[in-house]
Image: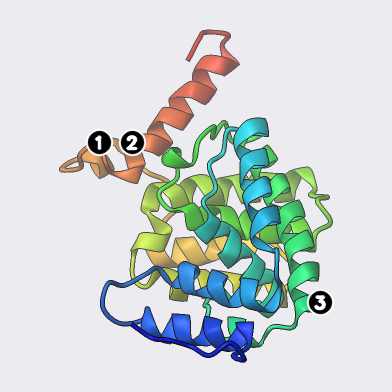
Amino acid sequence: MHTLTGDVSYEKVAEIFVRVNSLGMELRGSDLALAQITARWPGSLTPLEEFAEECDQQWRFSFDLGLLVRMLVVFATGQSRFRTVGSIKVEKLEESWARAKAGLRFAANLLRTNAGIEDVSLLSSPFMVIPVAVIGDLRDEQLSSEEERALLHWLFVANAAGHYSRGSSESLLDADLSLLFRRDGMPADLLEIVQQQVGRTRFTAADFAGRNTRSPLYATAYLAFKHEAHAIGRPA
């Protein structure tokens, strides 16, 4: 047990909490980051929880607080790791949260309306949402038909290939984010990265050999079948 005197600042308490909880029963990095954010920005937990509820009610997307915190950090720092979260100024946190909400609304709408993805369980990683939200922010939610096709192509190929499961998820995400922020959110750049990683952007029946239903290929195949059924007017 650690007893603290009454004159210890809230930020200092948060720092102690992070250090203590980095040992023993491990908490998620997003839990520790949230503790630091709420220490610097009192009351910030409420808008995060309210937005999570909004996403669930309006789009049926269950974005957990961990993803929301990471999204906030992405817009505040240009990368996805939580190492510097304790030094982000309150004004930057508030500004970044506004961008994060708008980006996630764009992503949720595109996933449901354009990609037919109605639940995060159809994604190989929740990280798939983050580049889509960043592109929505950087392009002021205005994509040409060619850019939209490139983004959807990346989304399906990266999802089927388990893009963020082929190594360090954060390193892969940061590489994607670095390119997007550097080149003002060009979807074609993401597709090129996946093509380099996988070697191709198309899949055949042979790719299913030896895979079970937990493979992201199956979720992506379901989306393809659903799209085809919708195109010919049959129920999915």
The spot of residue 23 in percent (x, y) is 30, 82
Quarter of the figure that contains the N terminus: bottom left
| Disc number lying in front (1 or 3) | 3
Instruction: Please say if 26 is above or below 206.
Output: below
Mark 2: secondary structure? helix
Q: Give the mark nearest the N terminus, 2 or 3.
A: 3
Residue at which label 3 appears: 91
Say what amino acid the circle numbered 3 marks. Answer: Glu
- Asked whether residue 177 appears in the rendered view, the answer is yes
Q: Give the mark nearest the N terminus, 1 or 3.
A: 3
- Asked whether residue 184 appears in the rendered view, the answer is no
Q: Residue at x 44, y 72 (%)?
A: 29
Say what amino acid the circle numbered 1 marks. Answer: Thr
- Which quadrant would residue 215 be assigned to in this image? top left
Q: Are marks 2 and 3 in contact (CB under 8 Å)?
A: no
Relative to 106, 162 lies left or right: left
Instruction: Please say if 187 is above or below 217.
Output: below
* Residue 218 badge: 2
- Which quadrant would residue 10 be assigned to in this image? bottom right
Mark 1: secondary structure? loop
Coloring scheme used: rainbow
Relative to 213, 100 lies left or right: right
Cα separation, mark 1 vs mark 3, equals 45 Å
The spot of residue 182 in percent (x, y) is 71, 77
Cα separation, mark 2 vs mark 1, equals 6 Å
Mark 3: secondary structure? helix
Instruction: Please say if 87 is above or below 212.
Output: below
Residue at which label 1 appears: 213
